[in-house]
Image (cartoon, helix red, strand yellow):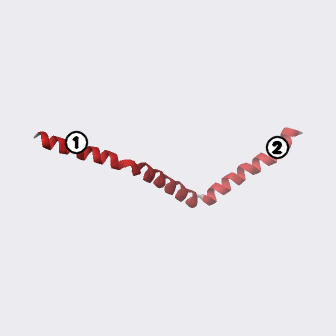
Amino acid sequence: MRELCERIKTNINSVNESNKGVAAIEVILILVVIIGLVVIFKSQAIALVTKIWNAITDNAGSITS
């Protein structure tokens, strides 16, 4: 019975040590999702930024004058 417990402990420790690459995979998957969202919503984002920029530049004269 003691030998079985030792084997289980050894297997659990080896599994815990083999999870080192999981963080890198998580980061890569998050980047893939973010890039995908950027590609999907590119035109909407450009339109929004353009609209905001135009509003800022149109109203800049009233602030500086």
Q: Is residue 13 above or below residue 36?
A: above
Q: Which numbered circle lies on residue 23?
A: none
| Quadrant assignment, res 9 | top left
- Tell me the crowding category of disc 2: few under 14, some 14 to 19, or many 20 or more residues within 10 angstroms, Cα based: few
Residue occupying the point 12% across, 39% down: 2
Q: Position of residue 41 (x, y in %)?
A: 58, 58
In the image, 23: left or right of 7?
A: right
Residue occupying the point 87% across, 39% down: 64
Disc 1: which residue: 9
- Tell me the crowding category of disc 1: few under 14, some 14 to 19, or many 20 or more residues within 10 angstroms, Cα based: few
Residue occupying the point 33% across, 46% down: 17
* Residue at the right extreme, as displayed: 65
Q: Position of residue 37 (x, y in %)?
A: 54, 56
Question: 58 and 46: which one is in front?
Answer: 46
Disc 2: which residue: 60
Q: State the quadrant of the C terminus.
A: top right
Query: Which SS class for mark 2?
Result: helix
- Distance of label 2 from label 1 (alpha carbons): 68 Å
Give whichever of discs 2 and 1 has the lower sequence position.
1
Tell me whether circle 2 and circle 1 mark residues in contact (CB < 8 Å). no
Task: Give the tally of numbered discs.
Answer: 2
Q: State the quadrant of the N terminus.
A: top left
Residue occupying the point 29% across, 48% down: 15
Label 1 is placed on what type of residue? Answer: Lys
Q: Position of residue 36 (x, y in %)?
A: 53, 59
Query: Which SS class for mark 1?
Result: helix
| Mark in the foreground, 2 or 1 | 1
Label 2 is placed on what type of residue? Answer: Ala
Question: 20 and 50: which one is in front?
Answer: 20
Q: Is residue 44 above or below residue 59?
A: below
In the image, 60: left or right of 53?
A: right
